[in-house]
Amino acid sequence: MSSITSVWCRDRSSLSKICHTEAQAQSVVYSTNPNLTMSTRVNNDLKTESLQLLREYQQAPSNEVRNELVKLNIGLVRKEVHHWLHQCTESYDDLLQVGSIGLIRAIERFDMSKGNAFSSFAIPYIRGEIQHYLRDKSPSVRVPRHWLTLERQSSSIVKDLQVRLNRHPTDIEVATALNISVGEWQEIKLACRNRSPLSLDAPLQDEEEGATCLGELVPDNRYRSFQLAQEDRIRLQQALAKLEERTREILEFVFLYDLTQKETAERLGISAVTVSRRVKKGLDSLKEMMTK
């Protein structure tokens, strides 16, 4: 672990408070002071103070000075966070924390003797840290942004329809409420569903056969003690997509969302016996497709 990261880990709590407090302070400044001249003067003062602290930090590095520099330059992080916020599903606070790591790296590595503006030097570090974080968190299936928006809207729509209809709504009913075709809604569900891999190690209690899990459907035994190969995970996702809608939905509630069969039955408005039969039928179908 680098010295920068070590410092970050030790002071993460204090930096989190700095980010939160400074974000509030900056918000107040911009919302209550529309005067452009005043804003320019404030920015110039901040730049002057930053240069003084950067010079001090370069001569004698300390956490106290570094934290002051983070407070003064958190606006650079906030600007970059807003750029990425609507391109991912991560929260503002998470991206602010990650971007702040990049800011710390820039503070650590900035060399005043080269004559660069600190903001121009820091932004690539901030942006790079956020991009690296998003790459690591990125799902294997990329979903169009407007589909993600519709998928989020569908959550409240499904709940409302379930209350009004006293049952789980059909795809046609949800698609109509979203003002899109049934085909597009089904594509959205499949794309968003495949962004979150199923928990292949999640156990399922079966009274007749004992505990089983989705991972056991993969025919190659060499993966039993190790993480399943990526291609087998993909095969399982593809096989799951071929199941009948309600059966696939039940398997997802049990394995992806870790609901019990009773909870799944209550969620879908069907009997626990029906859920049990569907689970068994679905697992049998998956096993047959996986062994072909």
Image (cartoon, helix red, strand yellow):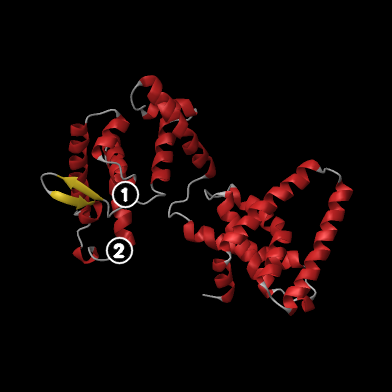
State the residue in front, 15 or 178: 15
Judge whether 179 appears above or below 196 on screen: above
From this viewpoint, which residue is outermost toward the right?
37
Label 2 sits on residue: 227
State the residue in front, 71 or 232: 71
Give the residue type that dot 1 points to. Gln
Label 1 sits on residue: 238
Count the marks: 2
Q: Report whether residue 99 is seen.
A: no
Disc nearer the start of the sequence (1/2) = 2
User: Looking at the image, is mark 1 or mark 2 nearer the viewer?
Assistant: 2
Q: Is residue 4 left or right of residue 237?
A: right
Give the residue type that dot 2 points to. Gln
From this viewpoint, which residue is outermost toward the left?
208
Q: Is residue 239 left or right of residue 120?
A: left
**SS at mark 1?**
helix
Image disc number at residue 181: none
**SS at mark 2?**
loop
Query: How far across and how far down the image is residue 218, in percent?
Result: 22, 57
